[in-house]
Amino acid sequence: MPKRILSGVVTGDQNEQTVTVSVQRSFQHPVLKKTIRKSKTYRAHDANNQFKIGDKIRIEECAPISKTKRWMVLPEA
């Protein structure tokens, strides 16, 4: 099974080697046919502490790193 890759905006960088990423998704309501935007936050591993609040990044699913971290920041290409 392939690993999921999501893109979002960094909303927190207080913790060492961890960033909080807000990911937005858009979908159409099944009955009302209105476009709805929902956001969800993920905690991702940032080994070099290189990302700051407001940066747009991509994260990839990985094996659990800690109690709350199951995502890893993809290196910028």
Image (cartoon, grey):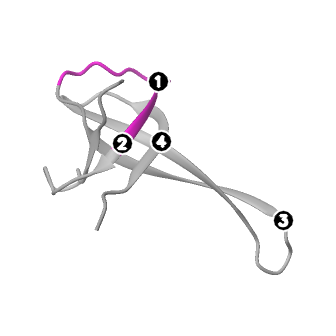
Please say whether residue 36 is one of the residues in the magenta stretch.
Answer: no
Lower position in the chain sequence, tag 2 or tag 3? 3
Lower position in the chain sequence, tag 3 or tag 4? 4
Q: Which residue is disc 1 drawn over?
A: 55
Residue at the image point whose x is 37% and y is 56% from the top:
4
SS at badge 4: strand
Q: Give, as a three-letter code, the residue at label 4.
A: Ser
**CA neighbours of label 2 inside 10 A, class few (<14), some (14 to 19), many (20+):** many
Instruction: Specify whether 17 is left or right of 1.
Output: left
Q: Which residue is disc 2 drawn over?
A: 59
| Image position, residue 56 (x, y; %) | 49, 28
| Image position, residue 25 (x, y; %) | 60, 54
Outermost residue toward the bottom? 31
Q: Give, as a three-letter code, the residue at label 3.
A: Lys
Q: Are marks 4 and 2 in contact (CB under 8 Å)?
A: yes
Q: Which residue is disc 4 drawn over?
A: 7
Region of the chain picked out in magenta, as a range = 48-59
45, above or below 41, in the image? above
Q: CA distance from mark 4 to mark 1?
A: 11 Å
2, above or below 10, in the image? below
Q: Are marks 3 and 4 in contact (CB under 8 Å)?
A: no
Which of the numbered marks, if any, corresponds to residue 34?
Answer: 3
Q: CA distance from mark 1 to mark 2?
A: 12 Å
Q: CA distance from mark 3 to mark 4?
A: 23 Å
**CA neighbours of label 1 inside 10 A, class few (<14), some (14 to 19), many (20+):** few
Residue at the image point whose x is 31% and y is 61% from the top:
2
For the stretch drawn in magenta, the main secondary structure is loop
| Image position, residue 10 (x, y; %) | 44, 32
